[in-house]
């Protein structure tokens, strides 16, 4: 069997006890990475994810859970310390933790507090966390990656989710910034842009998306699954995109293809 791409390496996936993050953590463990799971919940509530990822990695020691809120400086610091103390290195940082708009308010009614909540979690937190981990990434050996999970909302305006759209558009620039800053150190930076993926985040609007997909919204005609995003990440960490950095990988069933008739 060929050596797995993650053998002897460490990956951190933020917001990884559920949804897309959990699928990516499982895929990275299957690739042989030691995986740092992260979430805001107490460790007891992350037990299922932890044991699932440990079995995927085939090793009890291959996965730890670090409870931390990435939107808070203390949380980011705790996460950094957990990784440094346990492993002393980081090869893959996946900025996945994210929240949706609260209540889908019209953009003209957005409050500063609501905007800051989304921006702190989806953009400012990931940016500062990436800065904090940059030394470890830059000074490592072999292939190292940062992967930011944005959204089709990075380019698609939804007037009742302006805060979310702004945060994801910001993440697109964050990807380019870190790609430029870390390229001299051999760290590649990617943005994965999922479309409509079946997770807790989309559960409240699932029926609406079902109707839109049935009506032909997506060229590939089906919901995205967390595994679709995880497979795109695996291609990155296996080095299949190694002559690229700052690149966007759309995982959206073809949503970004404009099909307007001329
Ligand atoms: P989810 O709600 O299932 O998972 C998000 C995870 O992030 C949760 O486990 C949550 O607890 C965690 N999280 C939230 N805030 C956090 C914080 N401050 N600190 C640490 N952890 C935190 O949603 P998901 O669909 O799996 O979303 C994952 C990422 O994918 C998000 O960034 C989301 O914006 C993005 N995305 C999702 C979709 C979709 O259709 N589901 C589409 C495009 C992009």
Image (cartoon, helix red, strand yellow):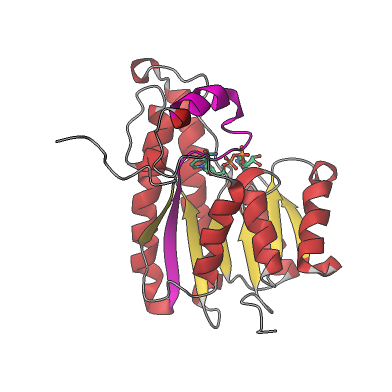
Q: Nearer the viewer, residue 70 or 227?
A: 227
* x and y percentages locating residue 188 in the rendered image: 43, 70
Occupied quadrant, residue 78: bottom right
Q: Is residue 169 left or right of residue 117?
A: left
Q: Between residues 57 and 131, which one lies in front from this camera angle?
A: 57
Residue 191 on the magenta span: yes
Look at the picture and state if 112 lies above or below 175: above
Confirm whether residue 17 shows in the render. yes
Q: Which picture quadrant has residue 175?
A: bottom left
Taking depth in this image into account, of 102 and 241 the one nearest to the observer is 241
Position of 260 with respect to 44 (left or right) is left
Q: Report x, y in % for residue 57.
A: 76, 67
Q: Residue at x 70, y 55 (%)?
A: 37
Query: Residue 11, relative to residue 238: is it above or below?
Result: above
In the visual, does 126 lie left or right of 86?
left
Left or right: where does residue 25 sit relative to residue 189?
right
Q: Does the magenta portion include 18? A: no
Please give the range of residues in magenta: 186-212
Spot occupied by residue 103 in the image (x, y as percentages of width and height): 51, 19
Give the position of the C terminus as an image quadrant.
top left
Dividing the image into 4 quarters, which one contains the N terminus? bottom right
Q: Is residue 72 above or below residue 188?
A: above
Looking at the image, residue 225 lies above or below residue 79: above
Is residue 132 at all visible to an observer of this figure?
no
Residue at horizontal 49%, vertical 33%? Answer: 118
Q: For ligand 1, which image quadrant applies?
A: top right
């Amino acid at each position: 069997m060929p050596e797995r791409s993650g053998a002897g390496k460490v990956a951190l996936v933020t917001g990884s006890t559920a949804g897309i993050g959990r699928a990516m953590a499982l895929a990275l463990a299957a690739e042989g990475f030691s995986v740092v799971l992260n979430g805001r919940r107490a460790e007891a509530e992350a037990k299922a994810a932890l044991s699932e990822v440990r079995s995927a990695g085939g090793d009890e020691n291959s996965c730890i859970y670090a409870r931390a809120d990435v939107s808070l400086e203390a949380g980011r610091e705790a996460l950094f310390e957990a990784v440094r103390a346990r492993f002393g290195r980081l090869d893959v940082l996946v900025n996945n933790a994210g929240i949706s708009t609260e209540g889908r308010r019209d953009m003209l009614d957005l409050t500063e507090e609501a905007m800051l909540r989304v921006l702190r979690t989806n953009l400012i937190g990931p940016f500062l966390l990436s800065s904090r981990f940059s030394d470890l990434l830059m000074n490592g050996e072999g292939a190292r990656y940062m992967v930011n999970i944005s959204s089709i909302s990075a380019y698609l305006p939804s007037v009742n989710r302006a805060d979310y759209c702004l945060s994801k558009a910001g993440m697109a620039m964050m990807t380019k910034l870190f790609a430029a800053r870390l390229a001299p150190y051999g760290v590649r930076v990617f943005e994965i842009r999922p479309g409509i993926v079946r997770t807790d985040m989309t559960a409240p609007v699932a029926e609406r998306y079902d109707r839109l997909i049935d009506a032909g919204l997506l060229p590939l005609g089906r919901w995205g699954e967390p595994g679709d995003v995880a497979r795109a990440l695996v291609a990155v960490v296996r080095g299949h995109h190694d002559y690229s950095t700052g690149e966007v990988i759309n995982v959206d069933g073809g949503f970004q293809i404009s099909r307007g008739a001329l």
